[in-house]
Amino acid sequence: MSNTSKTVTLNMGPQHPSTHGVLRVILELDGETVVKAEPVLGYLHTGIEKTMESKLYYKVLPCTDRMDYLAPMSNNLGFCLAVEKLMEIDIPDKVQWVRVCLAELTRINSHLVWLGTHALDLGAMSMLLYTFRDRESIMDMYEAVGGQRMMTTYIRIGGLAMDIPKDFEKDIRNVIKVINNGLNDYETLLTNNEIFINRTKGVGVLTADEAINLSLSGPMLRGSGIKHDLRKANPYSSYEKFDFEVPVGENGDAYDRYLIRVEEIRQSIRIMEQTLDGMPEGPYRAHVPGIVMPPKEDVLYKMESMIFHFKLITEGFKAPVGSVYQGIESGKGEMGFFISGDGTNKPHRVRVRPPSFINLAALPKMCEGNMFSDVVCAIGSIDIVLGEVDR
Amino acid sequence: MFEVILFASIKVLVVVAAVLTGCAYSTLLERRVVGRMQHRIGPNTAGPFGLLTPLADGLKLIFKEEIKPANIEPITYMLAPMISFVPAILTFAVIPFGKDNTFFGQDFTLVLSDLNIGVLFVFAVTSLGIYGIVLAGWSSGSKYSMMGAVRSAAQMISYEVGYGLSIVGVIIIANTLSLRELVEAQMGPLWGTITFLPNWFVFSQPLGFILFLTCAIAETNRAPFDMAEAESELVAGYHTEYSSMKFSMFFIAEYANMIAVSAVGATLFFGGWHGPFLDSMPMLSVVYFVLKVFMFMFFYIWLRATFPRFRYDQLMAFGWKVLLPVALLNTLITAFFVIL
């Protein structure tokens, strides 16, 4: 290690315990101070966007699960909303309510994993186990509705994969109880913990201007004091009918982002309770023959349904020429789908706006001038999922 | 003469064996306790309650292939684990484990060597362990190891001062540096008057005890002061490039250090082997001692399961700006009262 320069170049990742997968950061260190940080991406490139372009519209859905694998329902929702916008499908109320409920459940899921891994990065290893313990109830809920624990593909174009189970309300309330109890644990362990505050306060600071210029979204943007939430700013899936607050930070540091995410879990619980209280009756899929898959029980007994089912499975539906963009507020920020149809049964172009990828661009700004340990804290507080960053 | 040597050798063997077994079972204890604290079960398959896990771990580590990076300094690289391992064991030479008694007509002291400067010896030897860490980091030829080593050295220097000063109060009160006499000084009721409490220094030196505990954790590189191996930052710190038995020697050294520091803590602040019913059953003193050490170990593990890690610069600031002044103040107050 003969070195004539003052700084040391340190390669962090792609195999490193706290780069959340295969992120690679090239650091230039002066002692323990970071002079320059450069994220290097592409180690998990799967070509999901390209794959989507070679599939029938409804077959694209499983791909969306696999991008941000901690928030499958949000991704499903984003894609379905985009296709529904392209095809101009009206969605029944009950479907909207269930979708909102599950999207919020997914936000909690995403935030819980974030909280656990972020705390683990800072050395509080028990938090990971506690959040995963409570996340288990969410996984069980996924299993109850969609039969799958991670890659649910439950939200489908024009509705849901199947009707919600009989015990849906009871189960969700149970989950809410578990999460509420868990939140108390986490807050006791972290919120007023001197070491945790020391490690996160004033670390990875982004001013409001910087956040806007980097086109950040989600808790990263709100942490810097910008009150922007797509659920309020540009409501989709009848979010305008629910009452909730959008928490905003002041200092734009990692601690504010922690507080915001914890508060968001609380607000998500509020929204979920509202959806349960006012859950309307109705079909679980829109009745749009030829575009939306008919319910399975109809396929078994009605001839038209069976024909449509057969046609949809074999050749899908043809989308009109035109392009749509639909953004949703996922746990990590604005998750957007741009779909351009060309009159055939496959999308001409699918482009995802992944919140993790765009938020990750803030990493150099958050790290430079800070200590080496703060890099870990900064990466953690961005909340990235590499599956979504590289796609 | 022969009998003396035989007795001493047996004692040394027993103590070393006990310490090594203690290290092995501390790993199991840690994994089980942390497991319980984290709603997990922990290792429970090898043997009843997982009691054979340390054995399985040891066997596995011995038979593992040893992987050496290309750009190491071979001799230092090989010596480093030993250098950190030996001082950790040496500490036990002066720690009294139990009450003196007679055994086959011989006077039998439950301490290997009753040095009259025992405390100084302990502190000198525990600080030697840092050489192993620094050399390991330096000779591994890896930047992560190097950073771990540098951090560890800086941390050691900062905390050594506070560590030393934290026990000055105890020494002033007891007026001796011999660990055996320190234990004897803690006999009887508190200050000779309060009958329901023993005369342990933890009661007369509460501040000193807290300082000692904090510095001891930093001294042994344990969470939340585990800067040197901070796995989420430095991968594994100074032992990143070590594998097989060399790695496990670092591991044993860490646990031996923990036990050593716990033993010193128990001796200095919790009356060593003191406890009730010692007159009728003197061997009970060993049990008391082990229990007290166990208590310390449990505390270590508990901390690790609870707290996040300090940042390097905060750790240094804490050491120099908080612990050192408070330790000095504690010394000053104690000296003042003793003169009175």
Image (cartoon, rainbow, N blue to C red):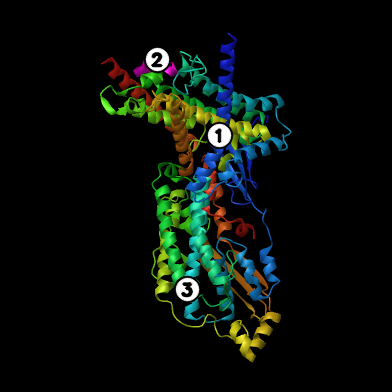
Of residues A37 and A191, the one nearer the viewer is A191
Quadrant into which the N terminus of chain B falls: top right
Q: Residue at x 52, y 28 (%)?
A: B154
Q: Name the front one of labels 1 and 3.
A: 3
Q: Which mark is residue A167?
A: 3
Q: Which three-letter amino acid code belongs to the residue tagged 3? A: Asp
- Tell me if I can see residue B304 in this picture: yes
In screen coordinates, is A241 left or right of A299? left
Image coordinates of residue B113 in percent, x first then y, are 51, 16
User: Does residue A212 sit above or below A74 in this rendering?
Assistant: above
Q: Which three-letter amino acid code belongs to the residue tagged 1? A: Ala
The residue indicated by pointer 1 is B228
Q: Which mark is residue B300?
A: none
Task: Farthest residue to the front: give it.
Answer: B104
Task: Farthest residue to the bottom: give it.
Answer: A303
The residue indicated by pointer 2 is B176
